[in-house]
Image: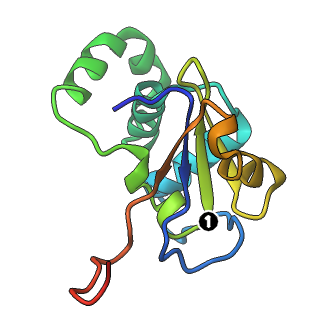
C-alpha cells in the first residue's frame, strides 16, 4: 500500500522515546535495518514499492548486474504477493521513527524527538497530512479501549 501526504506516528506501545538507529549482529542485516539505512541516507528518494524492491534485492544479496538485467522479472515476482505497509515496520513500532510520505509518495524518517515529528503530529486541522498510527507491538488486552 502506498501513501501520499501521510505521516505514520510511532506505535503507542513503542518502548523508546527517541529515534534509535536499529542495529543487528547478523551478517545479513534484517529488513528494518536496510529500510533505515536507505531512508536515512536518501530521504524522499523511494516510494513504498521502490523501497520494498531495494530492501528485497539487498537482503537477498542479488548481484547488481542481475538487478539491472532482471529488474522487471525480480519486480514482478516480488509484487506477485502482498507486503505489509510501513505501519508494520519495526522502525515505527520499536525504534521510535515516524514515517513521512510526501505528496509524491516518497518516504523519509523522523525521530520521535525531532522538530519534524512534532510538526507533522501537532498540526491538527491546519495540515493536509493524514496521520496514522504504527501498529502496536502487542495486541491490546480486553481491558483496554
**Residue occupying the point 58% across, 67% down:** 95
In the image as oriented, which residue stretches furthest toward the bottom? 143
Q: In which quarter of the image is the N terminus?
A: top left
In this rendered view, identify the residue nearer to me: 80 or 29: 80
In the image as oriented, which residue stretches furthest toward the right? 115
Q: In this view, does 73 lie to the left or right of 67?
A: left
Within 10 angstroms of label 1, few (less than 14), some, or many (20 or more) residues? many
In this rendered view, identify the residue nearer to me: 117 or 108: 117
Q: State the image coordinates of residue 49 (x, y, percent, origin top left).
A: 40, 26
Q: Quick one: SS at disc 1?
A: loop
Q: How many numbered markers are drawn?
A: 1
Q: Is residue 129 left or right of residue 60?
A: right
Indicate the colouring scheme: rainbow
**Residue occupying the point 40% across, 29% down:** 2
**Residue occupying the point 41% across, 35% down:** 52
Q: Is residue 95 left or right of residue 88?
A: right
Q: Quadrant of the C terminus?
A: bottom left
Q: Is residue 123 above or below residue 79?
A: below
In this rendered view, identify the residue nearer to me: 130 or 4: 130
Q: State the image coordinates of residue 103 (x, y, percent, origin top left).
A: 59, 20
Occupied quadrant, residue 70: top left
Residue that badge 1 annotates: 96
Q: Is residue 135 above or below residue 75?
A: below
Q: State the image coordinates of residue 101 (x, y, percent, origin top left).
A: 57, 33
In the image as oriented, which residue stretches furthest toward the front? 125
Q: State the image coordinates of residue 115 (x, y, percent, origin top left).
A: 83, 53
Occupied quadrant, residue 20: bottom right
Q: Is residue 113 above or below residue 52?
A: below
Amino acid at each position: 500500500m502506498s501513501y501520499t501526504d501521510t505521516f505514520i506516528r510511532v506505535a503507542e506501545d513503542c518502548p523508546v522515546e527517541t529515534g534509535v538507529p536499529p542495529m543487528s549482529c547478523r551478517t545479513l542485516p534484517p529488513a528494518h535495518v536496510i529500510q533505515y539505512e536507505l531512508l536515512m541516507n536518501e530521504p524522499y528518494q523511494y516510494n513504498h514499492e521502490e523501497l520494498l524492491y531495494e530492501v528485497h534485492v539487498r537482503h537477498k544479496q542479488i548481484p547488481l548486474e542481475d538487478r539491472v538485467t532482471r529488474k522487471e522479472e525480480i519486480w514482478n515476482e516480488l509484487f506477485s504477493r502482498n507486503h505489509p505497509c510501513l505501519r508494520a515496520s519495526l522502525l515505527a513500532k520499536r525504534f521510535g521513527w515516524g514515517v513521512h510520505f510526501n505528496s509524491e509518495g516518497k518516504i523519509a524518517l523522523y525521530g520521535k524527538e525531532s522538530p519534524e515529528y512534532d510538526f507533522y503530529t501537532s498540526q491538527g486541522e491546519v495540515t493536509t497530512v493524514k496521520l496514522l498510527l504504527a501498529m502496536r507491538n502487542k495486541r491490546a488486552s480486553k481491558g483496554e479501549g
